[in-house]
Amino acid sequence: IVNITSLCAIKPMSGMAYYCSGKAARELYFKVLAEEKKHVRVLNYSPGPVETAMIDYVISEAVNDNLKGVFHSFKSQGTLLKPEMTAKKCMKVLLSGKFSPGE
């Protein structure tokens, strides 16, 4: 099982309460699953800041100016990852098998 998680699962971000709490709940759920079902391989994969529609939405619609600024700086500085790039990194981790269950 691969759960796509986020820094938002462990760090509160003002203006993203639903997103952060949802990511935190999923991450802990899969950690518990990995603990209870030792035969199931679970990876909580955090891809980093990825160039998605969510980034553009936050920049244009977020009411929190600090949050807008953070996302805008990711985009303007070119630090956003292409989805294909982070998917390849995830596959590399999976194929290596070098990850602790639930991590």
Image (cartoon, rainbow, N blue to C red):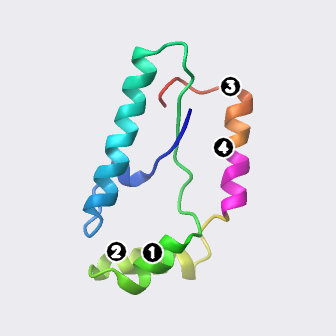
Q: Position of residue 31 (x, y in %)?
A: 40, 28
**Mark 3, residue position:** 97
Point 54% across, 56% down: residue:
48
Q: Nearer the viewer, residue 95 or 77?
A: 95
Q: Quadrant of the N terminus?
A: top right
Q: Quadrant of residue 83?
A: bottom right
**Which mark sits nearer the N-terminus, 3 or 1?**
1
Residue indicated by mark 2: 67
Disc 2 on helix, strand or loop?
helix
Q: Is residue 71 above or below residue 26?
A: below
Residue span colored magenta = 83-90
Per the image, the residue denoted by label 4 is 90
Mark 3 crowdedness (10 Å alpha carbons): few <14, some 14-19, many ≥20 = few
Eyeballing the image, is 101 above or below 38?
A: below
- Residue at the disc numbered 1: 71
Magenta span includes 88: yes
Indicate which label's residue lies in the foreground, 1 or 4.
Answer: 4
